Image (cartoon, rainbow, N blue to C red):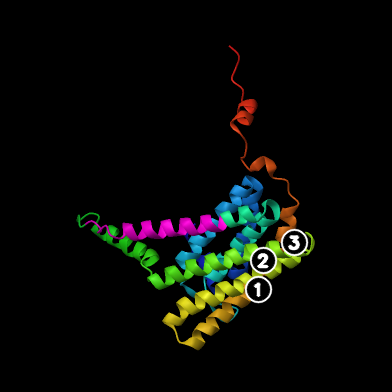
Amino acid sequence: MEDLTRELGWFWALNQDLLWLSVVCVDLCITIGMYRLFGKTGLYAVVVLDIMLGNLVGGTITTVFGLNTSMGAIIYAGIYFATDLLGEKYGAREANRAVILGFAVSLIVTYLGLVCLLFEPTTAPKTAAYASGMHSALAGLFAVTPRVMIGSLFAYLVSQSFDVWMFHYLKRLTNGRHLWLRNNVSTLASQAIDTALFSTVVWWGFFDFWTAVELAAAKYALKFVIALLDTPFIYWARSWDVSDKDWEGTVKQEADRYPLPHA
């Protein structure tokens, strides 16, 4: 097992472009899988999951197709797809609810993670080395600068809110036709806003202006590809009837479904 893990590590290290494409496809498949299994609740979960992961690894820079870009361009694949699918099937209200839910959970997780760092690792001889290592690892995840944290969440909230508005504006404008148009136009426009805000607030603080522009351009180019890739997925998922997975119903409906045995 250890040899297999090492071989896979070497393979992906030598094939970073393929790894990027695989992760994007897996993320989109997870999104439609969660929708298939849990209805709109599954899409809420995807938005929360991806925004949390995106905030944790968004400051990491990697190279894909020769472009320097942040990991956020990879992990965020499912967010816009999930909100567009929510909007298409359940309306703008549910899509906006997912956006606010993701924002609120990210704030809570970040706050609690920083609170946990206030606890000093134990100095007991038998566990001190392990505790110190774990504390350092946690600090690497949560001890980000306020600029990164605020910039990431601000860009997410503004761009996602715009995405929901634009999607439904185009849906009304086209009388519900041309799903591909509203899916791609709303995503690409909102991704441009997200990239511009994040790069201005965050990257320009760490790098010079032109390096920030280079990172922004690379990030948007990859997001452009993701927007095109998710179009077949949203057509596929739109046709599903998952009303029995939405976990909605009144107390009376539940009582009718699970009646008490007669005495």
In the image, 224: left or right of 194? right
Marks 3 and 1: which is nearer the front? 3
In the image, 251: left or right of 116? right
Asked whether 111 falls inside the magenta stretch, the response is yes
Say whether disc 2 or disc 1 marks the residue closer to the N-terminus: 2
Q: Are marks 3 and 1 in contact (CB under 8 Å)?
A: no
Does residue 29 show up? yes
Q: Identify residue for label 3.
A: 172
Which type of secondary structure does the marked residue at label 3 adopt?
A: helix
Q: Identify residue for label 2.
A: 166
Where are the magenta residues, as a range? 98-122
Which type of secondary structure does the marked residue at label 1 adopt?
A: helix
Q: Quadrant of residue 98?
A: bottom right
> Front-most of 49 and 21?
49
Query: Mark 3 belongs to which amino acid?
Result: Arg
Say whether disc 3 or disc 1 marks the residue closer to the N-terminus: 3
At 47% from the left and 77% from the top, the residue drawn is 201
The residues bearing labels 2 and 3 have C-alpha atoms spaced at a distance of: 10 Å
Q: Identify residue for label 1.
A: 224
Q: Position of residue 197 (x, y in %)?
A: 52, 75
At 62% from the left and 46% from the top, the residue drawn is 38
Query: Mark 2 belongs to which amino acid?
Result: Met
Q: How many marks?
A: 3
